[in-house]
Image (spheres, helix red, strand yellow):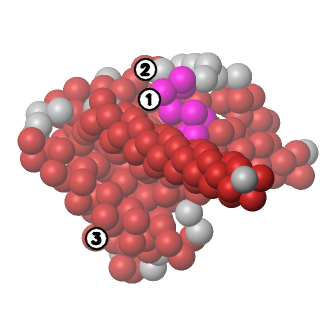
């Protein structure tokens, strides 16, 4: 009788443990499913603009350099699809241009020129629609493009055009992190270290962009790197 009782008790314990394990497994699977659903819902709730901004930041600041070109090219396709659906949306055109410009930077060499030309076209089209869209980001980005590229006969780079665009962007968005950072970088590259320090400080003090936390972290790291280079020249 005792043996039967022990066996029965053991069976019940085993069944209870098995039920608990199964319940935990089911709960775990349910939690995973809920997380995946939440991620899908978040993706669906994001506007096309935010999707491009967040994916760009992930590629630009989190991927290894040898992974960036292919990832940016894939993101260009997504940007083009969004622009095709809303061809008069200056904000989407700006981000199409930013991604094209970033692809040029990731690719490098003469092969980057086609992406750079495409970026210029996107920025110019956005400016024709609304040059103040996204606080003048088309002017900032096109100014950076002109500054980074070599001049004729290799490419269409021009510091004269770059400076004009970067200054105009600062008139539109004097406290923004990007226009101040990129103008500081422009000044540094042209040997104007005291002025570069001033604009780097303004960039560092710019208000946070709550909808773009990763981009802010990455940009602030770039500001710190620029300040370190400026300090070496002092």
The residue singled out by tag 3 in the image is: 114
- Rendered residue at 16%/44% (across/down): 83
Pick the front one: 37 or 216:
37
The residue tagged with tag 1: helix, strand or loop? helix
Kindly report the distance in space between the C-alpha atoms of the residues bearing marks 3 and 1. 25 Å
- Rendered residue at 58%/40% (across/down): 214
Residue stretch rendered in magenta on the structure: 209-216
The residue tagged with tag 2: helix, strand or loop? helix
Estimate how packed mark 1 is, as few (under 14), some (14 to 19) or many (20 or more) residues with alpha carbons within 10 Å: many
Pick the front one: 192 or 110:
110
Q: Specify the quadrant that holds the C terminus.
A: top right
The residue singled out by tag 2 in the image is: 172
Percent x, y of residue 96 = 28, 49
Percent x, y of residue 102 = 43, 58
Closer to the observer: label 3 or label 1? 3
1 and 2 marks in contact (CB < 8 Å): yes
- Rendered residue at 31%/50% (across/down): 97
The residue tagged with tag 3: helix, strand or loop? helix
The residue singled out by tag 1 in the image is: 169
2 and 3 marks in contact (CB < 8 Å): no
Kindly report the distance in space between the C-alpha atoms of the residues bearing marks 1 and 2. 5 Å
What count of labels does the image hold? 3
Kindly report the distance in space between the C-alpha atoms of the residues bearing marks 2 and 3. 29 Å
Q: Is residue 82 above or below residue 78?
A: above
Is residue 21 part of the magenta span, yes or no?
A: no
Pick the front one: 169 or 175:
175
């Amino acid at each position: 009788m005792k043996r039967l009782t022990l066996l029965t008790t053991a069976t019940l314990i085993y069944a209870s443990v098995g039920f608990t394990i199964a319940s935990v497994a089911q709960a775990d699977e349910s939690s995973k499913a809920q997380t995946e659903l939440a991620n899908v819902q978040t993706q669906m709730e994001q506007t096309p603009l935010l999707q491009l901004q967040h994916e760009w930041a992930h590629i630009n600041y989190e991927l290894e350099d040898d992974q960036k070109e292919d990832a940016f090219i894939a993101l260009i396709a997504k940007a083009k699809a969004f622009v095709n659906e809303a061809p008069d949306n200056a904000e989407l055109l700006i981000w199409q241009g930013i991604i094209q410009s970033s692809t040029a930077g990731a690719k490098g060499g003469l092969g980057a020129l086609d992406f750079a030309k495409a970026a210029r076209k996107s920025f110019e089209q956005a400016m024709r629609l609304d040059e103040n869209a996204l606080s003048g980001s088309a002017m900032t980005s096109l100014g950076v493009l002109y500054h980074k590229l070599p001049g004729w006969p290799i490419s269409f780079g021009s510091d004269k055009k770059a400076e004009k665009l970067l200054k105009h962007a600062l008139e539109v968005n004097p406290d923004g992190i990007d226009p101040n950072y990129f103008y500081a970088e422009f000044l540094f590259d042209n040997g104007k270290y005291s002025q570069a320090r001033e604009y780097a400080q303004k960039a560092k003090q710019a208000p946070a962009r709550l909808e773009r936390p990763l981009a802010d972290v990455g940009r602030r790291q770039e500001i710190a790197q620029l300040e370190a280079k400026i300090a070496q020249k002092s």
